[in-house]
Amino acid sequence: KAGVTQTPRYLIKTRGQQVTLSCSPISGHRSVSWYQQTPGQGLQFLFEYFSETQRNKGNFPGRFSGRQFSNSRSEMNVSTLELGDSALYLCASSLGRGRATDTQYFGPGTRLTVL
Amino acid sequence: AQTVTQSQPEMSVQEAETVTLSCTYDTSESDYYLFWYKQPPSRQMILVIRQEAYKQQNATENRFSVNFQKAAKSFSLKISDSQLGDAAMYFCALSGGSNYKLTFGKGTLLTVNP
């Protein structure tokens, strides 16, 4: 089975721009979660989607949004980019059986640099 | 709220020897899982091992095993016969309840010396 894929792998943007990141889960997985990883804050949960619905959201401003499509693929969008948004964005997928204890499998990440 | 604490920012081990990475956690949930993930320089987060909280038996995956002390809320990872490829950042993580998210520790950077 193919693993979680994320595109693009690297992005360079300037302040004020917006960006869209994409994640394709493992086949059969219906839940997709997004995490931000920075040296200062570590790994922080952004949001989780299951069956095209956002089930949970972390403590991030409204500039961060996401969506999930009927094929379980997910996108996250960051509008009005700030320098502090520079980070590795990780996507993870799980079966989404409705239990919070499902194991999450991660993609390779998208490295976003904001200049 | 759930918290995960890794008190060792860095550890080193000689090739072929054994090393133990520490992790403590806190949660009010009765049904939860604990995980160790490995993140090598490629930045790909790789699942190493997981432990169901309701199981008393410690999980084992080849050279990796855990010491799960539920009452003490401790979850350490033991790596036996360390190999150069084990060098990475190791994260302890917790999921449970209705949060549908992983809560991570700050990580332990493991160096393996030849």
Image (spheres, rainbow, N blue to C red):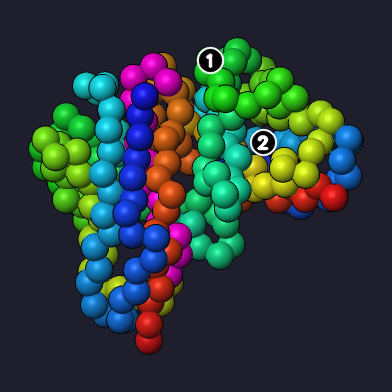
Q: Mark 1 Cα within 10 Å, few/some/many (few <14, many 20+)?
A: some
Q: Is residue B18 above or below residue A81?
A: below
For this view, does B114 lie left or right of residue A88? left
Q: Which residues are magenta?
A: B87-99
Amino acid on which the number 1 mark rests in the picture? Arg
Element at badge 1? Answer: strand
- Which mark is drawn over residue A23? 2
Q: Is residue B93 above or below residue A54?
A: below
- Asked if one can make out residue A66 in the rendered structure from this viewpoint, the answer is no
C-alpha span from label 1 to label 2? 17 Å
What residue is shown with label 1? A55
At which x and y percent is residue B90? 40, 56
Query: Is-magenta flag for residue B19?
Result: no
Amino acid on which the number 2 mark rests in the picture? Cys
Q: Nearer the viewer, residue A40 or A103?
A: A40
Q: Within the image, what quadrant is residue A62 found in?
A: top right
Q: Is residue A92 above or below residue B32?
A: below
Q: Nearer the viewer, mark 1 or mark 2?
A: 1
- Asked if one can make out residue B101 in the rendered structure from this viewpoint, the answer is yes
Q: Within the image, what quadrant is residue B26 found in?
A: top left
For this view, does B108 lie left or right of residue A40? left
* Earlier-in-chain disc, 1 versus 2: 2
At which x and y percent is residue A95? 46, 27
Q: Mark 1 near mark 2, Cβ–Cβ under 8 Å?
A: no
Q: Residue at x 72, y 35 (%)?
A: A22
At which x and y percent is residue A42? 52, 46
Element at badge 2? Answer: strand
Majority secondary structure of the magenta segment? strand
Q: Within the image, what quadrant is residue A4 found in?
A: top right
